[in-house]
Image (tube, rainbow, N blue to C red):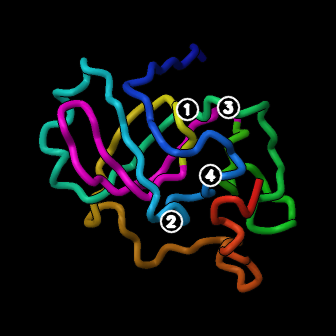
Amino acid sequence: MEDIRYKPIGIIRTPFTDKKQTPIQPVFGENTPGKIELFPEYTDGLKDIEGFSHLFLIYHFHRAKECTLRMMPYLEDLERGIFAIRHYNRPNPIGLSLVKLESVTGNILEISQVDILDGTPLLDIKPYVPKFDRRDDAGGGWVDSPHIDLTRGKAGKHR
């Protein structure tokens, strides 16, 4: 199979420069502001994005190390498969976060509910569409277990 190559469309700016201070998921970064600096050549692609409250950001984990197929997730002390957790040391270090869109000015998007390191290369933006993306019958796998301590997901409580 031929190589698959992507190039960044922008840079994600956040207050987080250290993995240890970064929330493990956007829900734990509720009040955290951030910014997307979309490269100017992609500005036209932002047409009509203002009507969406949330966006999926697809990005490259630029500080990930080698892939590990089994690891202990941040919320518990039991080893899991990499595809059953959201750790960054993946076969393809691609991240996905659902963030809140606050405003758009030119090629700059102000966002919140951020769990991403500063300087992260942005690969794509997709709108969150409740009619398409919401699943009332969704299950959370091992994360739904009653022994999972979600307070460990807040900034400074993991990694």
- Give above or below for 15 relative to 25: above
Q: Which residue is mark 3?
A: 63
Can you tell which mark lies on residue 157? none
Can you tell which mark lies on residue 60? 1
Kind of residue at badge 4: Thr
73 inside magenta stretch: no
Q: Which type of secondary structure does the marked residue at label 2 adopt?
A: helix
Can you tell which mark lies on residue 27? 2
Which segment did they paint magenta? 91-115
**What is the spatial separation of the Cα atoms under label 3 and label 4, in whole angstroms?**
13 Å
Q: Are marks 3 and 4 in contact (CB under 8 Å)?
A: no
At a point 58% along the width and 15% down the height, the residue shown is: 3
Characterize the local packing of mark 1: few (<14), some (14-19) or many (20 or more) Cα atoms within 10 angstroms: many
Q: Disc 4 or 1, which lies upstream in sequence?
A: 4
Residue that protrudes farthest toward the front in the picture: 15
- Give above or below for 148 relative to 22: below
Q: Which residue is mark 4?
A: 22
**Residue 66, image x and y in percent?**
79, 31
**What is the spatial separation of the Cα atoms under label 2 and label 1, in whole angstroms?**
20 Å
Q: Disc 4 or 2, which lies upstream in sequence?
A: 4
At a point 22% along the width and 55% down the height, the residue shown is: 52
Q: Nearer the viewer, mark 4 or mark 2?
A: 4
Q: Nearer the viewer, mark 3 or mark 1?
A: 3
